Image: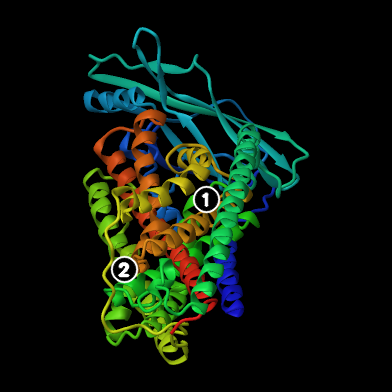
């Protein structure tokens, strides 16, 4: 297993390194500026092609070859007409082109300015962002026509690239105008710097988020103290109660005429296998696979493997890691299916390989259709779709099948400390506050409260313009989430068994994954209170992909909660005398 993990991480690192440009330039060498897309400020995922608006357009257009990560990110880089040479000053302003705008073009620019559209350019893989225009207090709209490039270099490398706007060079866009002539110009200034290529902001964006670090560490300390107190309290209570139970059951064993009570009474039913064995085993296998993916991606992020502004590279890495870890899902699912004496192996494999991939495909297909209708760059091209399907059917499915075969042949049978009777024991009625629904709600709320503060920073990174670079903090939060989930699920499983309810299998899984429901509920709060997202396109992407993320968290945390409860139940029943 360790060899396979090293192989997966190594392959992912190779893919990341190959996708980076490490350019060295000569003086006056042409460095291309790529124009990418246009995005409204309040809707970061609503990206459109740069030449949707009538900017200077080379004839013919030449597209830069894209990596899988760039395509997934919705990037569509096009060579621009800017002649920006390494360390070559451009002063005075140089004309780029003249554009004649008609009524439709003017209205399009006015709409974009009103919605604060900003452009994204790339110079030596350094992202350059800026607004296309502005609006004064009288609602007059202006289009920026001159861009002042400020570059920094160190020896033969580009270190920084920025663009500035001079309000003296802008054109008013009257609402009743039917024709307008616009001249676009630019300047370029190069200055020397001591910053090395490795430390440039485009490669290490940690400085972009420093103002929030102290707040996040403070929240982590609070959450960690909460976790220590909670786990310590629960461990003390459970262990103390268990000690009393052991003493009482030992005394009962010496008095043969006494009736059994509490969780010991369930020794003949507690290991009764759950219903829907194939689905249950598939959830366990897929959940453990997703847990492995989370650890691999967070570890690579902490090690600095990902390009700070290349979020698409991370998307591509997730897809590759998911495909390669499919063998783990197949093995875990089949080996557990063998423990619970499942017999329909074909169904088990098919459910395992589709229980996450099929909902992901349905959500993606719906959202990709929305992107096509809106002519967004987020719509995946046909070639990329074929490549992803090939990856799934030629890599993911065969690896899942191989893992399932290994799990079936080498998985160990159930080592239950107690025999299970044929007839199930009747479950006594319980008050409403001890019902399974209440248990699941409590199990989801406590882990959610431990990560609530950090969720805000994760959300503004996913659905905003800020970069989340302190991955070490995120790693600690993830570990805290797992610890709280394990402790609370084990404690609630014990309470359920104490009430003589032996249907703990599905309940422990639902309890572990219940945090995902609270996170999805938080999505509504974040949308209406913390963000300015609007429109069908952005909102559908937001709720669609958050549903997929929460579903993945449900599978992962549900598996963690069940496995911890499973180990706990086996341990306590192994410690008592069962007939």
**Colour scheme of this structure image?**
rainbow
Please give left or right for residue 560 compared with residue 51 in the image: right
- According to the picture, the residue beneath numbered tag 2 turns out to be 355
Which residue is more in the foreground, 179 or 74?
A: 74
Q: Quadrant of residue 329?
A: bottom left
**What label does residue 233 carry, if any?**
none
Give the residue displayed 32% in from the left and 17% down from the top. Answer: 173
Name the one closer to the observer, 282 or 82: 282
**Disc 1 to disc 2, C-alpha distance:** 29 Å
Looking at the rendered structure, the secondary structure element under dot 1 is loop
Q: Quadrant of the N terminus?
A: bottom right
Residue 207 relative to residue 111: left or right? right
Which dot marks residue 310?
1
* Residue 285 in sight from this viewpoint: no
Counting other residues with Cα less than 10 Å from the Cα at mark 1, is it few (<14), some (14-19), or many (20 or more)?
some
Given residues 81 and 412, the one toward you in this image is 412
Which quarter of the picture shows residue 347? bottom left
- Depth check, mark 1 against mark 2: the one in front is 2
Residue 67, given in percent of the width and then of the height, sits at 46, 59
The residue positioned 43% from the left and 35% from the top of the image is 119
């Amino acid at each position: 297993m360790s060899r396979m993990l090293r192989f997966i991480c190594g392959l992912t690192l190779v893919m990341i390194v190959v996708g980076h440009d490490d350019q060295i330039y000569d003086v006056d060498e042409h460095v291309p500026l790529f124009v990418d897309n246009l995005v409204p400020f309040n809707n970061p995922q609503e990206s459109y092609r740069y030449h949707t608006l009538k900017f200077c357009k080379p004839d013919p257009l030449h597209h830069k070859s894209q990596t899988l990560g760039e395509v997934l990110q919705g990037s569509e880089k096009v060579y621009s007409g800017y002649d920006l040479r390494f360390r070559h000053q451009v002063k005075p302003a140089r004309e780029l082109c003249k554009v004649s705008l008609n009524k439709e073009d003017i209205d399009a620019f006015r709409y974009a300015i009103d919605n604060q559209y900003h452009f994204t350019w790339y110079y030596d893989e350094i992202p350059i962002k800026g607004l296309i225009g502005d609006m004064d207090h009288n609602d007059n709209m202006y289009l920026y026509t001159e861009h002042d490039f400020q570059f920094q270099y160190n020896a033969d490398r580009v270190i920084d690239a920025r663009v500035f706007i001079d309000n003296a060079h802008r054109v008013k866009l009257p609402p009743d105008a039917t024709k307008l002539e616009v001249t676009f110009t630019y300047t370029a200034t190069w200055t020397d710097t001591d910053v090395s290529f490795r430390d440039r902001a485009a490669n290490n964006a940690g400085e972009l988020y420093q103002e929030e670090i102290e707040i996040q560490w403070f929240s982590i300390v609070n959450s960690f103290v909460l976790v220590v107190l909670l786990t310590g309290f629960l461990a003390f209570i459970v262990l103390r109660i268990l000690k009393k139970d052991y003493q009482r059951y030992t005394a009962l064993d010496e008095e043969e005429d006494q009736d059994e009570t509490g969780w010991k009474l369930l020794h003949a039913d507690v290991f009764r296998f759950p219903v829907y064995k194939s689905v249950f085993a598939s959830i366990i296998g897929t959940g453990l696979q997703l847990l492995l993916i989370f650890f691999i991606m967070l570890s690579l992020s902490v090690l600095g493997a990902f390009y700070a502004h290349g979020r698409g590279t991370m998307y591509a890495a997730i897809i590759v890691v998911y495909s390669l870890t499919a063998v783990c899902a197949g093995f875990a699912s089949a080996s557990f299916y063998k423990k619970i004496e499942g017999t329909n192996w074909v169904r088990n494999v098919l459910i395992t390989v589709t229980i996450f991939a099929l909902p992901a495909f349905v959500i993606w297909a719906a959202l990709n259709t929305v992107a096509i209708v809106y002519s967004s760059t987020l719509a995946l091209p046909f070639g990329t779709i074929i490549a992803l399907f090939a990856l799934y059917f030629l890599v993911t499915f065969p690896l899942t099948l191989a893992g399932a075969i290994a799990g079936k042949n080498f998985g160990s049978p159930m080592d239950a400390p107690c025999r299970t009777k044929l007839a199930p024991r009747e479950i006594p009625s319980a008050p409403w506050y001890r019902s399974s629904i209440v248990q699941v709600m409590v199990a989801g709320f406590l882990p959610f409260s431990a990560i609530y503060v950090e969720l805000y920073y994760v959300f503004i990174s996913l659905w905003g313009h800020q970069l989340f670079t302190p991955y070490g903090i995120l790693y600690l939060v993830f570990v805290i989430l797992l610890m709280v989930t394990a402790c609370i699920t084990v404690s609630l499983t014990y309470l359920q068994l104490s009430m003589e309810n032996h249907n703990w299998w599905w309940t422990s899984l639902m309890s572990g994954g219940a945090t995902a429901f609270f996170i999805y509920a938080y999505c509504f709060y974040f949308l209406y209170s913390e963000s300015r997202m609007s429109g069908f396109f952005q909102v559908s992407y937001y709720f669609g992909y958050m549903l997929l993320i929460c579903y993945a968290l449900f599978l992962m945390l549900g598996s963690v909660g069940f496995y911890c409860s499973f180990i706990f139940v086996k341990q306590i029943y192994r410690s008592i005398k069962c007939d």
